[in-house]
């Protein structure tokens, strides 16, 4: 951050510090954020004559439709009075005039706010600022805060829109230093790198004269990504018409973003309040460029019913590819963005920031894997860039930029590019929370060059789409059971539920119940006697032979039991044995041994049967593939594996020498202390 920006932030933070004792530190934002927004509006309108604005507004009071009246007023102010802002204030107060009457600061400040056009009043209303005005007045703090805010110049000539964005986010960052990793603010250099990826190969589109370009962020926060995106486009093409769209769930961030867009002449109605996962505020609308940094690893348990209801509609909704586990909704945000892509000649591009979880979480058949499968098999994933750790204010975890497009260049079709940019950073002189590293402009340029070249190198790997796919194949082994009856497994039979139930009657009549249970106990006794007759006898290597003999002896003993009881006895006495015969069902099909069941992860590009003959058969000769599992296809992106560098371990002698030196050093220090 430049010194100029830092001075504004430091000044504003000093004002916030004056609230100590009146507010908890985490609540300073309730006062400071709306104060900063109001002061910015005031500075922008400062040079314009309020009486003129008031007269213009009064001249159109006869128009009943509010929206129509506002539009006519703004057009009149722009055309006849060169007031080129989509907002105004008709009150008798400016910030300076508010300071002339300390006794009535509360009522005057409220009147000043009510003098703003409807769009500004709506924004300020989101902050619930009137409650804070009353509280500050009660604590005799309101006038002092307003006076101090009057000393900071937030006019666009002093603080550009871009710098104002820095100020909002830096102040908010200080207010949220202890927030969770999922509530991160995106550092500006990361956003700039995202923009390079977002607009890669589309420079010709951006430079067309009078081109209308849409850019959207459905987790827009205070609008930092949208502002830099707009700035990026206008730098390439000052004549471009840039339409920005955003959705935000938090009232405060939404209000800041809407205020910022209003001040820059964007349509504030394109910034919409609501939960992106449950409220599609841009239903059936398409965007050319989409960018986002959704919350990392944040649960969507509260949204689960609505999300799954929409997912049940398939691709008529936004989540047709599947739903991830409820502990992390990252891939839901991406699916929402994909649903907004144009399907025309130009198509759309997406740049989204994720942590490592969406790369590999979830096995074949899981929601996450199915979403990756949909994205990759539809050739939407163009590339992934790994960022350095310690880049974000509230978390030091590894992060990645995913680049998605439905119109790949010819050379990129069917390919996915991985760029390892983890070493492209500079250490900061002073950490900001968890942020210890920054990516310098020249490093952003280097990363872009690596991506644009699309050539394999130490930090760039290119793969066919299929290389990230695999089959999770079930390997079965036949059930082979040996039967040797002994005292121990006879005792185990007594605990089998179906055997116990022989002496349980469900009859309600007590007399009948007593008779049936007595008969059951007698049958249990006979079954045990039959089993005891096997002790010390033949060891059966055939289940069919053992069952046949068991049934025969039970019949002779007049103790015939149901098939479920027989199954229970067989389950206890039979043990796995490679020497035994293969067990088959009534249709002659081989029965599998669930206790020996295993799976093999087979690359999608490899022939399953060749892999099986090479990797499995030599070790387990009787193994076979459950062919119903051949369609169990999954996708994962093991990013770090492809850039792994083996580091040779230090020699043992070198380590021991270092340990001895440390022991001598510690002994000397202890000697000094004791002497």
Image (spheres, helix red, strand yellow):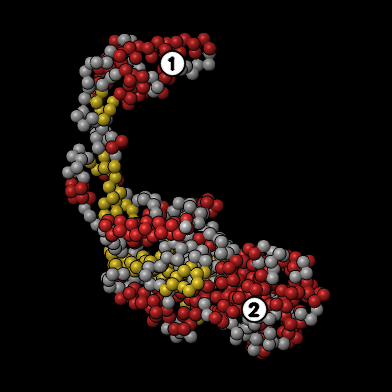
From the image, tell me which residue sits under label 1: 503
Q: Given contact means CB atoms under 8 Å apart, are the residues at marks 2 and 1 in contact?
A: no
Query: Sequence-wise, which precedes: disc 2 or disc 1?
Result: 2
Q: What residue is shown at x 48% (from left), y 85% (from top)?
A: 238
Within 10 Å of disc 2 (Cα), the crowding (few <14, some 14-19, many 20+) is many
Please name whichever residue, 458 or 330, is drawn nearer the observer in this view of the structure: 458
> Is 287 located above or below residue 333 in the figure?
below
Which of the pair 220/339 is nearer the observer? 220
The secondary element bearing badge 2 is classed as: helix
| Residue 546 position in % (x across, y down) | 25, 21
Report the disc number at residue 34.
none
Point out residue 551 in the picture as x, y percentages from the top left corner. Answer: 29, 17
Q: Tell me where residue 335 appears, x and y as whole percent.
A: 44, 61
Residue at 69% x, 87% y is: 48
Look at 68% across and 85% down and name the residue there. 46
User: Where is mark 2, residue-wise?
Assistant: 40
Q: Is residue 261 visible?
A: no
What residue is rendered at 37% in x and 68% in y? 422
Q: Kindly indicate the quadrant of the structure image that contains residue 557.
A: top left
Above or below, 617 against 605 in this view is above
Residue 91, located in which quarter of the rendered image?
bottom right
């Amino acid at each position: 951050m430049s010194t100029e920006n830092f001075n504004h932030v430091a000044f504003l933070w000093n004002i916030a510090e004056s609230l100590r004792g009146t507010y908890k530190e985490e609540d300073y934002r309730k006062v400071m954020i709306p104060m900063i927004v109001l002061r910015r509006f005031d500075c922008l309108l400062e040079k314009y004559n309020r009486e003129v604005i008031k007269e213009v507004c009064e001249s159109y009071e006869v128009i009943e439709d509010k929206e129509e009246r506002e539009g006519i007023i703004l057009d009149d102010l722009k055309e006849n009075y060169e007031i080129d802002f989509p907002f105004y204030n008709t009150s008798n107060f400016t910030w300076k005039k508010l300071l002339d009457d300390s006794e009535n600061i509360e009522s005057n400040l409220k009147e000043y706010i009510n003098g703003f056009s409807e769009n500004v009043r709506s924004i300020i209303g989101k902050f619930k600022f009137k409650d804070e005005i009353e509280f500050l007045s009660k604590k005799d703090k309101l006038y002092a805060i307003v006076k101090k805010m009057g000393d900071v110049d937030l006019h666009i000539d002093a603080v550009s829109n871009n710098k104002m964005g820095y100020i909002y986010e830096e102040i908010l960052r200080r207010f949220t230093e202890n927030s969770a990793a999922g509530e991160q603010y995106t550092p500006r250099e990361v956003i700039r790198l995202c923009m390079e990826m977002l607009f890669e190969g589309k420079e010709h589109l951006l430079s067309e004269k009078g081109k209308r370009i849409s850019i959207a962020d459905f987790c827009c926060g205070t609008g930092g990504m949208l502002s830099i995106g707009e700035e990026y486009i206008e730098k390439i093409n000052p004549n471009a018409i840039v339409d920005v769209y955003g959705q935000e769930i938090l009232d405060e961030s939404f209000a800041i973003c809407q205020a910022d867009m209003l001040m820059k002449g964007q349509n504030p109605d394109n910034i919409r309040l609501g939960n992106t996962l449950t409220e599609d505020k841009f239903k059936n609308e398409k965007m050319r460029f989409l960018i986002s940094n959704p919350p990392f690893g944040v649960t969507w348990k509260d949204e689960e019913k609505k999300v799954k209801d929409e997912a049940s509609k398939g691709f008529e909704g936004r989540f047709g590819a599947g739903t991830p586990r409820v502990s992390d909704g990252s891939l839901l945000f991406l699916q929402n963005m994909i649903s907004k892509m144009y399907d025309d000649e130009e198509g759309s591009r997406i740049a989204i920031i994720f942590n490592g979880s969406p790369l590999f979480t979830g096995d074949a058949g899981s929601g996450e894997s199915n979403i990756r499968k949909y994205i990759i098999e539809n050739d939407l994933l163009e590339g992934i860039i790994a960022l350095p750790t310690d880049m974000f204010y509230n978390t030091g975890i590894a992060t990645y930029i995913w680049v998605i497009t439905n119109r790949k260049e010819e050379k990129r079709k069917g390919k996915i590019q991985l760029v390892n940019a983890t070493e492209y950073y500079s250490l900061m002189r002073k950490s900001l929370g968890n942020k210890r590293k920054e990516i310098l402009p020249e490093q952003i340029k280097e990363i872009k060059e690596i991506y644009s070249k699309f050539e394999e190198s130490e930090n760039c790997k290119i793969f066919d789409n299929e290389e990230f796919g695999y089959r999770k194949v079930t390997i079965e082994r036949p059930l082979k059971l040996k039967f040797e009856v002994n005292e121990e497994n006879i005792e185990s039979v007594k605990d089998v539920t179906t055997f116990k139930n022989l002496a349980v009657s469900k009859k309600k009549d007590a007399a009948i119940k007593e008779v049936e249970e007595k008969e059951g106990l007698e049958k249990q006794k006979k079954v045990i006697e039959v089993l005891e007759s096997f002790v010390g006898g033949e060891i059966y290597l055939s289940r069919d032979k053992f069952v046949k003999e068991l049934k025969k002896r039970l019949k002779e003993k007049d103790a015939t039991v149901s098939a479920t009881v027989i199954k229970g006895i067989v389950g206890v006495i039979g043990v796995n044995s490679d020497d035994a015969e293969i067990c088959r069902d009534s249709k002659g099909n081989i029965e599998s041994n669930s206790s020996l069941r295993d799976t093999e992860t087979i690359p999608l590009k490899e022939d399953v049967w060749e892999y099986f003959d090479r990797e499995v058969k030599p070790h387990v000769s009787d193994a076979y593939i459950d062919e119903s599992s051949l369609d169990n296809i999954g996708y994962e992106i093991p990013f770090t594996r492809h850039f792994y560098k083996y580091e040779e371990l230090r020699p043992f002698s070198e380590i021991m020498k270092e340990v001895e030196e440390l022991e001598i050093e510690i002994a000397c220090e202890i000697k000094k202390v004791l002497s």
